[in-house]
Image (cartoon, grey):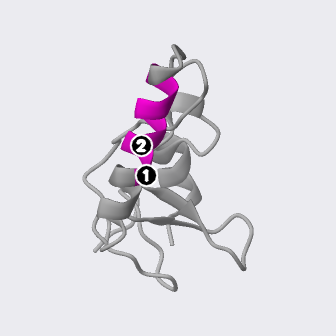
Amino acid sequence: MLTKEHLNCYCLPFGGPSRCKYLAEDDNYIGRYYCLKKSVKKKIVDAELNEIIKSLKSKGKDPTKQGIPQGNNCSGFILLKNKKQGDDVKG
């Protein structure tokens, strides 16, 4: 799970289009977030987001103005659900 410090500095969960596109919130624990950048789900995120952006552009809409997350804000972390992760975590 990502630390609050890392979330606020890099992932920007409430940052609209600046929000990291690989950020995922836990289905069972509100406020617990994970990074999908170094997981097998990365390809799924990229494909789905590309399809959404393509669809919006075909309708003449700007994905940025629609608030679609497009950030790629850090080097990423492997998906660990019970260990704190972030640039602020030592080791």
User: Going by the picture, which residue comes out furthest to the bottom?
Assistant: 82
Q: Do the residues labelled 1 and 2 touch (CB within 8 Å)?
A: yes
8 to the left or right of 86: right
State the residue at coordinates (63%, 72%). Answer: 26
Compared to 40, does 61 lie above or below? above
Image position, residue 38 (x, y; %): 27, 67
Residues shaded magenta:
48-57
31 or 43: nearer the eye? 43
Q: Residues within 10 Å of mark 1 (few under 14, many from 20)?
A: few
Secondary structure of the residue carrying tag 2 is helix
Q: Mark 1 points at which residue?
A: 48
Compared to 43, does 50 lie above or below? above
Q: In which quarter of the image is the C terminus?
A: bottom left
User: Going by the picture, which residue comes out furthest to the front?
Assistant: 58
Residue 65's mark? none
Residue 55 belongs to magenta span:
yes
Image position, residue 33 (x, y; %): 57, 65
State the residue at coordinates (37%, 62%). Answer: 44
47 or 55: nearer the eye? 55
Q: Mark 2 points at which residue?
A: 51
Compared to 19, does 1 lie above or below? below
Image position, residue 74 (x, y; %): 31, 47
